[in-house]
Amino acid sequence: MQEMTLSAVRKDLSKVVAQCHDTEGVVITVHGKPEACIVSARQYEELKKKALERELEPIFSEFDSLFKALSNK
């Protein structure tokens, strides 16, 4: 991910947003510390989907074990 200062992002926000489609995104720093990210809408949706899959994985695993146990009876 590319890093940019908040002041640089303010100057060229439209370019930064356009750039997010071609890169992993942009990390915005404030006083040298990463504070925020700008990513494309597609990347954001992918991140949300992966987070949901990780959250639901234990539930599906539990159901899978249950269904296997029931089918073996």
Image: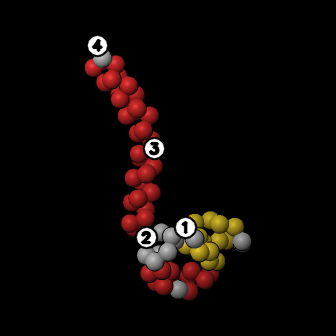
Three-letter amino acid code at the position of disc 3: Arg
> Quick one: label 3 or label 4, which is nearer the N terminus?
3
User: Where does the image place residue 47, in percent across and percent down from the top left?
Assistant: 45, 57
Q: Exactly how many numbered labels are in the figure?
A: 4
Which of 41/23 is in front? 23
**Colour scheme employed for the rendering of this structure:** secondary structure
Residue 17 at least partly seen: no
Q: Report the residue at 46% width, 77% height from top.
A: 22
Question: Circle 3 sits on which residue?
Answer: 54
Q: Is residue 60 above or below residue 46?
A: above
> Which label belongs to residue 37?
1
Name the quadrant containing residue 45: bottom left
Name the quadrant containing residue 69: top left
- Which quarter shows the C terminus? top left
> Which label belongs to residue 73?
4
User: Where does the image place residue 1, in percent across and percent down from the top left?
Assistant: 57, 71
> Quick one: label 3 or label 1, which is nearer the N terminus?
1
Does the CB distance between marks 1 and 2 fall below 8 Å?
no
User: Where does the image place residue 64, in percent across and percent down from the top left?
Assistant: 35, 29
Can you tell which of label 2 and label 4 is closer to the viewer?
4
Can you tell which of label 3 and label 4 is closer to the viewer?
4
Does the CB distance between marks 3 and 1 fall below 8 Å?
no
Does the CB distance between marks 3 and 4 fall below 8 Å?
no
